[in-house]
């Protein structure tokens, strides 16, 4: 996170109280060092799904299903489907149990496997909302694979794009992160330069890229 933990904590405290299932998952993620979105990011995803009216949602990177449940919360009271992909079978299996406990399992399809091999099987324009929160080193590949799947007017959100603020030129970091930083800079350059998308970069969590596919 590129801004202070105290600020993120304060933003979280401004949110309405979360139910016990969300709190349990947050504790589990912290205890087991499982990467999940922060509550403010989760709340934003839910809000964005709700206000956009999205109903065909793709998530790349399930983990234990924390962000998936936030996306499902945005679908509350209306029809919709979330397809979520993850390579880690053990975590995805745990996520399914959380979805059942949250009463949203019927809205979520979990696909286990390498997203880079699964994504080409989806039809072009299949989804109106896409959330990518997976290995940052693979973001350039995901960008190429998921952009065609986004329908006209659809929204794409990518998490962790600012990488603790190190993508800013002149930032100081350990040499071992150079490849990742360079990768994310290239990703952001290609994303913001895509003429088919209108993109904003938001300083929320560890950075969100929010794009909308322009209508013809």
Image (cartoon, rainbow, N blue to C red):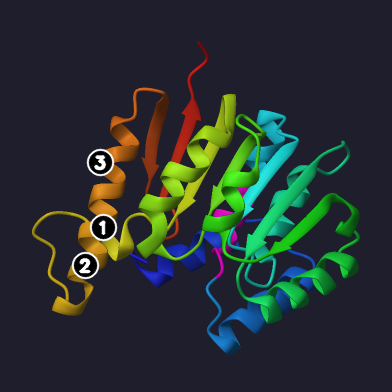
| Residue 109 location (% of width, % of height) | 79, 55
Image x and y of residue 44, in percent = 59, 47
- Find the residue positioned furthest to the top: 216
The image position of residue 35, as x and y in percent, is 52, 73
SS at mark 1 in the image: helix
Dominant secondary structure of the residues highlighted in magenta in the image:
helix
Identify the residue position indicated by label 2 in the image: 179
User: Residue beneath label 1, please?
Assistant: 183
Q: Going 52% across and 33% down the picture, which residue do you hit?
A: 148
Q: Earlier along the polypeptide chain: callout 3 or callout 1?
A: 1
- As drawn, is 60 to the left or to the right of 185? right
Residue at image point 37% right, 67% down: 1
- Is residue 39 part of the magenta span, yes or no? yes
For the residue carrying disc 1, how many other residues have a C-alpha within 10 Å: few (<14), some (14-19), or many (20+)?
A: some
Contact, mark 1 vs mark 2 (Cβ under 8 Å): yes
The residue range painted magenta reads 36-45
- Is 51 above or below relative to 103? above
Q: How many marks?
A: 3
Q: Which residue is mark 3?
A: 189
**Crowd tier of the residue under label 2, counting other residues whose Cα lies within 10 Å: few below 14, some 14–19, many 20 or above:** few
Identify the mark nearer the N-term, 3 or 2. Answer: 2
Q: Is residue 180 left or right of residue 147?
A: left
Judging from the image, what secondary structure is the residue with disc 2 in? helix
């Amino acid at each position: 996170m590129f801004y202070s933990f105290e600020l993120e904590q304060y933003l979280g405290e401004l949110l309405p109280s979360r139910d016990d299932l969300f709190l349990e998952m947050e504790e589990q993620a912290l205890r087991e060092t499982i990467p999940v979105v922060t509550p403010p990011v989760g709340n934003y995803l839910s809000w964005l799904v709700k206000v956009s009216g999205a109903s065909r949602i793709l998530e790349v990177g399930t983990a234990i299903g924390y962000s998936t449940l936030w996306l499902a919360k945005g679908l509350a009271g209306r029809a919709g489907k979330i397809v979520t992909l993850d390579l880690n079978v053990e975590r995805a299996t745990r996520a399914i149990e959380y979805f059942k406990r949250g009463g949203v399992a019927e809205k979520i399809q979990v696909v286990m496997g390498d997203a880079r091999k699964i994504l080409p099987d989806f039809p072009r324009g299949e989804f109106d909302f896409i959330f990518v929160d997976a290995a940052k080193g693979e973001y350039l590949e995901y960008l190429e694979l998921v952009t065609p799947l986004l329908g006209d007017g659809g929204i794409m959100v990518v998490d962790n794009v600012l990488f603790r603020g190190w993508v800013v030129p002149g930032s100081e970091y350990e040499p071992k992160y150079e490849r990742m930083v360079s990768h994310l800079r290239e990703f952001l350059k290609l994303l913001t330069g895509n003429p088919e998308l209108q993109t904003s970069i938001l300083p929320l969590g560890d950075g969100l890229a929010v794009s909308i596919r322009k209508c013809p």
